[in-house]
Image: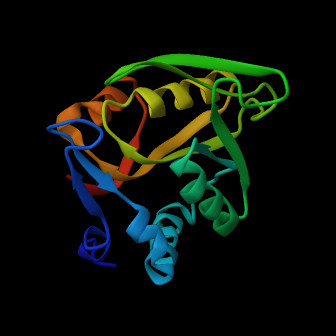
Amino acid sequence: MDTGYFYDRIRTVPDWPEPGVQFRDITPLLRDGEAFAELIEAFAGRYATAHIDAVAGIDARGFIVGAALAYRLRCGFIPVRKAGKLPFDTVCESYSLEYGQSTVEVHTDAADPGDHVLVVDDLIATGGTILAAAKLMQRLGAKIVETAVIIDLPALGGSARLKDAGIAGFALLTY
């Protein structure tokens, strides 16, 4: 599929959440049933022959893509949540954001040692969130197959941070 199809369904919201930021809004893409299906198929095609035990989707938009992709790949889904949202024993990872500090967590039994995990989110900017999620999976003994996002903003350095950490990344679109 031509990626222009997806670019056409991403809305740019200027000056949000603060002046100078060009927010890339995926909600029109998700709202379009055919486009959403094509998005999941684009990712599924990439990973169809990969050995993936689970897709780890990052709270909250990574849940949308990650859960649908896990269903399509017939593998498990691991929710990577913001701190304080999971009811069982957890392991957490803190990281820096453009505007402060945050923490993500997973249940201690979310992945088994040796599991092959694909980490999914909607977008990579500075890379803090997706790198923290990948580190969580590694701490549980999982092997990261790749990280996958709809949108990469390479000027913000996140994809370079992943590469420097030895974690492969894939982005469908680049702005």
Image point 19% across, 44% down: which residue?
Answer: 15
Quadrant in the rendering for residue 27: bottom left
Query: Please, which residue is most extreme toward the right here?
Result: 88
- Nearest the viewer among 121 and 42 is 121
Number of numbered discs present?
0
Image point 45% across, 78% down: which residue?
Answer: 32
Q: Is residue 15 left or right of residue 100?
A: left
Residue 56 locus on image (x, y percent): 62, 43
- Nearest the viewer among 26 and 105 is 26
Image point 63% across, 53% down: which residue?
Answer: 51
Query: Please, which residue is most extreme toward the left here?
Result: 20
Q: Is residue 13 left or right of residue 115?
A: left
Colour mapping? rainbow
Residue 149 locus on image (x, y percent): 41, 50
- Nearest the viewer among 173 and 142 is 173
Q: Quadrant of the N terminus?
A: bottom left
Residue 116 locus on image (x, y percent): 65, 42
Q: Is residue 10 left or right of residue 175?
A: right
Image point 50% across, 20% down: which residue?
Answer: 102
Instruction: Check the image and report above or below for 122 versus 68.
Output: above
Residue 42 locus on image (x, y percent): 44, 70
- Nearest the viewer among 145 and 34 is 34
